Structure formats: C-alpha cells, structure tokens
Amino acid sequence: MIDVLAADMAGMRGTGSHTVVADGVLVPAERVGALRLPPDLGSAQLFGICALAPVVGATFGALDVVNAMFASDRKPYMTSYSRMGESPGARQWLAAATTLAQRAERTMLAVAAEVDAGTDLTARDGSRLHLNLTEAACDCRAALDRMLDLHGASGFRASSPLQRFWRDMSVAGRHPLLNPYLAMEGYGNALV
C-alpha cells in the first residue's frame, strides 16, 4: 500500500509513511498507553508539541551538519580565510543559528511543562501556548536559513543531509498546528 500524498510531499519522504504498512499486527497491551489530554486545554497544544518536536530535532540535526563543516578544513568561498571558523561573519551566523535553535527547544519544553503541570488553563492560556509553539517553529526556520547561508548552495544537493533537514523542517514547520498567522489570529480572538 502506498500513501501517494506522503510520497509526493517534499518533507514527508523520510517518514516511512509511503513505504511501510503494519496491517494486522498485534500490539501487546503493555505497549499501549492512554493519551491523556488535559480537560481544560484541549488537544491542540498537546498535538502542537508533537508536531513541533521533529521540527526542533531537524533543526539540531542541521546544526550538527554545520558544526561538522566548521570543524573541517572547508574554507568560505570567495574569501581569504582558510577555514570557516576564521570568519567573524561565519561565527556570528553560527551563533545566531545556535541561539535560535536553543530558544525553540526552550520554548517547546516550557510549553510542555505548562501542559504537564495540569493546572487549569484558560482559553487565553491555550491560545498563548499555541502562539508560543508557532514562534518556536519560526525560530527553527530562521535558524536553518542561517545555516544554509553558511553552507552555501551545496547544502541543497540531493545527497546533502542539510537539504533533507531543511526540506523536512520546512514542511513540518508549516503544519496547521504550527501556522503563525492562525495562532496569532486565535490569540487575538482570545484577548478580546
């Protein structure tokens, strides 16, 4: 069975959804857990965290690729530097990408902690948390843009792991639960 939609989506190719089907497989009861949704919050924030986690993971995966480039003998194209780390501009871009990735992770973990706390959250709280998740996804996109600037056009080669992280993050980061204008609209409605 082939899921044509997933196979045709740029950022879905790595999910396995178009190549693996587990039909009629018995899952032992001890491997099944109940999904616990906080009754006062709803599912959007919990599922938003689930949508954001791979986006943050892909961003850190891309950061690993760029850090490896900095550790190598690769020199910045069209410069007199003999290594990437010698360039103040490259170091600044790396620091900015790292900061954005770390902020996205902190935001995601803070939202998860607030959801896990089990306190009574209002609709305004839920909208604020949704907006926080979308801001973290935007931070991931901005971080990856900087990393691609550092790596250059070769980062888009089909064999480059950087383009795979970019492709997967770019698609997953636009999931409806991570859509910034929808989250801002929802938060605006909750404020009034």
Image: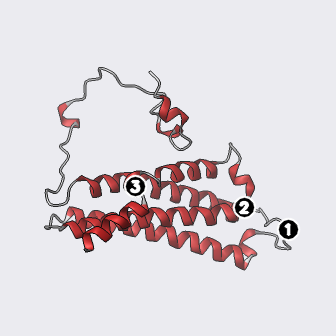
Q: Foreground: 170 or 111?
A: 170
Q: Which mark identifies residue 53?
A: 3
Residue at position x 70%, y 73% from top?
Answer: 90
The secondary element bearing badge 2 is classed as loop
Q: Marks 1 and 3, how far apart in space?
A: 37 Å
| Mark 2 crowd level (few <14, some 14–19, many ≥20, 10 Å Cα) | few
Q: Name the quadrant containing residue 89.
A: bottom right
Q: Amino acid at mark 2?
A: Ser
Q: Name the quadrant containing residue 86.
A: bottom right
Residue 22 against residue 147 in the figure, above or below = above
Instruction: Tell me whether the residue at label 2 lies in contact with that at label 3, contact meaning CB atoms closer than 8 angstroms.
Output: no
Q: How many marks?
A: 3
Residue at position x 71%, y 72% from top?
Answer: 85
Disc 2 target residue = 72
**How far from the left and from the top, in percent, is residue 139?**
49, 67
Q: Which mark identifies residue 78?
A: 1
| Mark 3 crowd level (few <14, some 14–19, many ≥20, 10 Å Cα) | many
Q: Amino acid at mark 1?
A: Met
The quarter of the image holding the N terminus is top left
Please state which of the two labelled residues, at mark 2 or mark 1, is closer to the viewer.
Answer: 1
Q: Amino acid at mark 3?
A: Ala
The quarter of the image holding the C terminus is bottom left
